[in-house]
Image: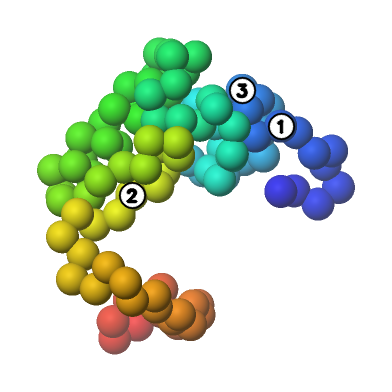
Amino acid sequence: YAPGRPLVSCTAAKGQRFPDNGVDMGTGFDCFDPLAHTDSPQVTGVARDNRRLLRQLMTDGGFVNYDREWWHYRYRDEPWPDTYFDLPVARSSAEPVGG
């Protein structure tokens, strides 16, 4: 979202969506449209290659994809599958150690 700019569909071409410094994945993050399904046949070219690379890297790391959201993964061997964590997020959590 960019204040002052008109809203655009999350399915719009990357250059038409709000800039997010991300690579082209065919839709924006958290776009709940069939186009966001990991293996959507409508996603081609670079976006399809990026999705395949993400899935391969995540699978190699032990994660499983939710097939209706290209960005959604869970750890396969989750040690606490029925525990939900509510952790604070703060700018300080993103600072380097000692920095």
Label 3 packing within 10 angstroms: few (<14), some (14-19), many (20+): some
Residue under the point 24% across and 73% down: 80
User: Above or below — where is 68 with respect to 1?
Assistant: above
Q: Which residue is mark 1?
A: 9
Residue at mark 3 to residue at mark 2: CA–CA distance = 24 Å
- Label 3 vs label 2, nearer the camera: 2
Residue under the point 59% across and 32% down: 33
Horizontal relation, residue 91 to residue 98: left or right: right
Do the numbered discs 3 and 1 sit on residues whose CB atoms are within 8 Å?
no
Of the 4 image quadrants, the one containing the C terminus is bottom left
Task: Choose between 16 and 33: the one closer to the eye.
Answer: 33
Picture coordinates of residue 63 (x, y %)? 22, 50
* Colour convention of the picture: rainbow
Numbered disc 2: secondary structure? strand
Picture coordinates of residue 38 (x, y %)? 40, 30
Q: Amino acid at mark 1?
A: Ser
Q: Which residue is mark 3?
A: 13
User: Above or below — where is 25 with respect to 62?
Assistant: above
- Label 3 vs label 1, nearer the camera: 1
Numbered disc 1: secondary structure? loop
Picture coordinates of residue 94 (x, y %)? 41, 73
Numbered disc 3: secondary structure? loop
Picture coordinates of residue 62 (x, y %)? 15, 51
Do the numbered discs 2 and 1 sit on residues whose CB atoms are within 8 Å?
no
Q: Which residue is mark 2?
A: 73
Horizontal relation, residue 70 to residue 17: left or right: left
Q: Is residue 95 visible?
A: no
